[in-house]
Image (cartoon, rainbow, N blue to C red):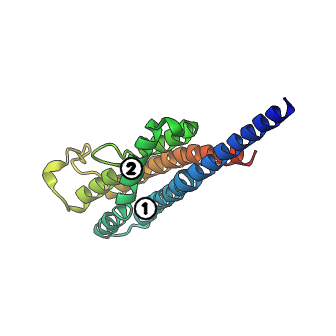
Amino acid sequence: MIDALVKLLEKLVELVKIKKEAEEKILDLVIIPLFKDFKAIHEDYLKLFEDCRRDLAGDADLRAIVRQLSKDRVANEALRRSIASMVTAYAKNPKLSRYHDFFQAVAAYADAAEWSRPSTASTSLLEMLEHWAGEGDEDKFQIIWQGENGVRNKRVLIAETIAVTDISLKRLREAWERVSRSYAEIHLSRAL
């Protein structure tokens, strides 16, 4: 009888060990790499918007800003799309339900950055600047940039763009805070 009880306890300990190893594997192969890649995306977005904001405030040439923004915004496009696809698949996997809050936080960030729309936050900014700089396809812009006297001041347009950029930065930072908090909770539960 005691032998059977000892064997049962050994099996339970072994099952707990196997479950812990499986959790470690998921963290090492899924969660940690996803977070690292996502952190790079977030840093890229911050740099893109902060650089554009700085250049606009510094009265840089709009065409130069457009060229730089066009180049910078595609740098991590493949990684963004990959992360969005992975998070969608991971969130549907019942074996990963423990990490659902983290996947939801990443998805919320993608919504804040408007990844699922044809025009993301950075694309919208680029299109606005292209319009002012006289670059791009004029027919695709439905924005009216004329005030009471028929022409809006460049300074006003730049101030409005900086305000839009600030709103985007705020939304991205708030969404990132949720992602990093969720990631921290995963690591805390790992340590306990």
> Mark 1 and 2 residues: CB-CB less than 8 Å, in contact?
no
The quarter of the picture where the C terminus appears is top right
The picture places residue 98, in percent across and down from the top left corner, at 58, 37
Image quarter (top left, top right, bottom left or bottom right) of the N terminus: top right
Residue at the disc numbered 1: 48
**Residue drawn at 73 percent across, 37 percent down:** 12
* Residue 168 percent across, percent down from the top left: 44, 48
Please state which of residues 85 and 181 is positioned toward the viewer in this rendering: 85
Residue 112 shows in the view: no
Amino acid at dot 1:
Leu
State which tag comes first along the sequence, 1 or 2: 1
Residue 20 in sight from this viewpoint = yes
Q: Which residue is denoted by mark 2 in the rendering?
A: 160
- Residue 61, percent from left and from top: 32, 69
Q: Is residue 88 above or below residue 39?
A: above
Disc 2, SS? helix
Taking the spot 86% from the left edge, 32% from the top edge, the residue there is: 2
**In this rendering, position of residue 138 left or right of residue 123:** left
- The kind of residue on which mark 2 rests is Glu
Residue found 56% across the figure and 49% down from its top: 26
